[in-house]
Amino acid sequence: MSNDFEAGLARMQRALAAEEDRRDSRRALRRARRAERRRRNPGAGVGLLLGSLAIGAAVVNGAPYWLMFLAAWLASGAASAQTWPTRPVTLVVPYPPGGATDAIARIMQDSLSQSLGQQVVIENVGGAGGMIAAGRAARAAPDGYTMLLHQVALAAGMTLYPNIGFDAEKDFVAIGPINTAATTVAARATLPPNSFGELVKWMNEPGRDTRMAHAGVGSFGHLAGVLLAQEIGGTVTQVPYRGAGPALNDLLGGVADLSAQSAVAAGPLIQAGKLKGYAIIGRARFAGLPDLPTMRELGYTKLDLDFWHMLLAPAGTPRPIVDRLNAALRHALADATVRKRFEEGGLDAFPVEEQTPEAGTALLAREIRLWGEVIRANKISASQ
């Protein structure tokens, strides 16, 4: 059921309850007046009885009006969902073409279009760490013709950009989670530690200042790196770059010490001995680096988390349409071509039982709290 429908239904229920209270008050007043009139003039009882019957008929006839109104409203919503979509559906992507988020949208585009029976048109809207696109989608009409593909940055942005003008939990309804991707705790090849335990000791040596490269303030690599440093201890200087590529280049060049890098990008470099790998930030080990343990296996449960993407729609989108969009998402995630391209890119589709609007809503709420705590505790701002 959509938020608009629930709000409207609640208003109707309040109006009905208020009307019933007024009717009860009128009935009580009429009873008191009748009693007083009978006391003064016993012959007036017949006239009062006829008046009561007329008022009672009006009350009874009032109920079908509300019932018919509600039934018409429900029927209208159902009919709208049955005929939707009648034109192309826009998929807003919060980053320019060529990045990972854009790639996921284009991998799923054909399958989504086939399932919906209308073309899905990708609209790239960059800026402000993905928040401009999210704001554009949040303000779109809740008619099912606008979807937003976003990731961890949406959750982090709720704290990083306090005056952004929308609330991700209130202004969106989740269609469903899409995928996760593993992240590697990677280091320059010349860094002395050879295991995660040795890394912890090295970072906590007196006078040590570890330089940690990341793809930009608010990126998953940045936030995961901050959380990693928070859990491990020691002094860490976070060094922002304009994207993951430049950060990786400086890691390869020995300018930076550590970085939370995409496992797909860092994996071949670790295998070639050009980087060192210590652990996987993700709920499961990465197939390309099977010997690296997850942070949970190492005892760091706060880092038992994934980089993720999900589909959302503006709040108020009717639930039948959300269900249609979710069915299209499921269709795409089950598509052999989509799954093959996901596998090639190191992406893991969420398990079938987690591909629900409810799972997406819970994930977003959980991550908003998690990254909000990390950002506030470390006094991170978007202007850094």
Image (tube, rainbow, N blue to C red):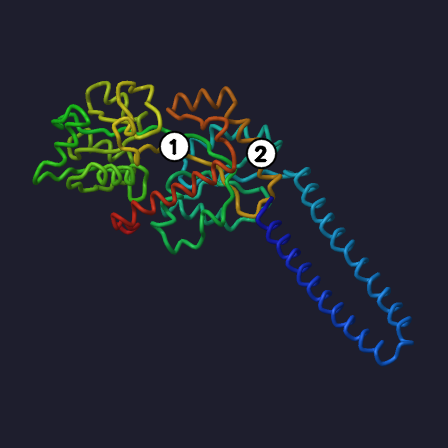
User: Residue drawn 13% across and 28% down?
Assistant: 191
Distance from the alpha carbon under mark 1 to that under mark 2: 22 Å
Disc number placed over residue 100 in the picture, else none: 1
Q: Residue at coordinates 36% horizontally, 32% vertically from top-left? A: 306
Give, as a three-letter code, the residue at label 2.
Gln
In this picture, residue 133 sits left or right of residue 288: right
The residue mark sitting in front, 1 or 2, is 1
- At label 1, counting other C-alpha atoms closer than 10 Å, the crowd grade (few under 14, some 14-19, many 20 or more) is some
Give the residue at x 26% y 50%.
379
**Relative horizontal placement of residue 35, taking residue 270 as reference (left or right):** right
Residue indicated by mark 2: 119
Direction from residue 241 to residue 163 in the image, left or right: right
User: On residue 362, which mark appears?
Assistant: none
Q: Residue at x 13, y 32 (%)?
A: 201
How many neighbours does mark 2 have within 10 angstroms: few (below 14), some (14-19), or many (20 or more)?
A: some
Between disc 1 and disc 2, whose residue precedes?
1
Residue nearest the viewer, comparing 186 with 11: 11
Q: Secondary structure at mark 1?
A: helix
The N terminus, quarter of image:
top right
Who is closer to the viewer here, 186 or 6?
6
Task: Give the quadrant of residue 323.
Answer: top right
| Residue sitting nearer the eye, 90 or 354 | 354
Residue 216 position in % (x across, y down):
28, 42
Does 313 sit left or right of 186 as displayed?
right
User: Which image quadrant is residue 31 in?
Assistant: bottom right
Looking at numbered disc 1 in the image, what kind of residue is underneath it?
Ala
Q: Position of residue 250 (x, y in %)?
A: 20, 33
Is residue 98 placed above or below 130 in the rendered structure?
above
Residue 217 x %, y %? 29, 44
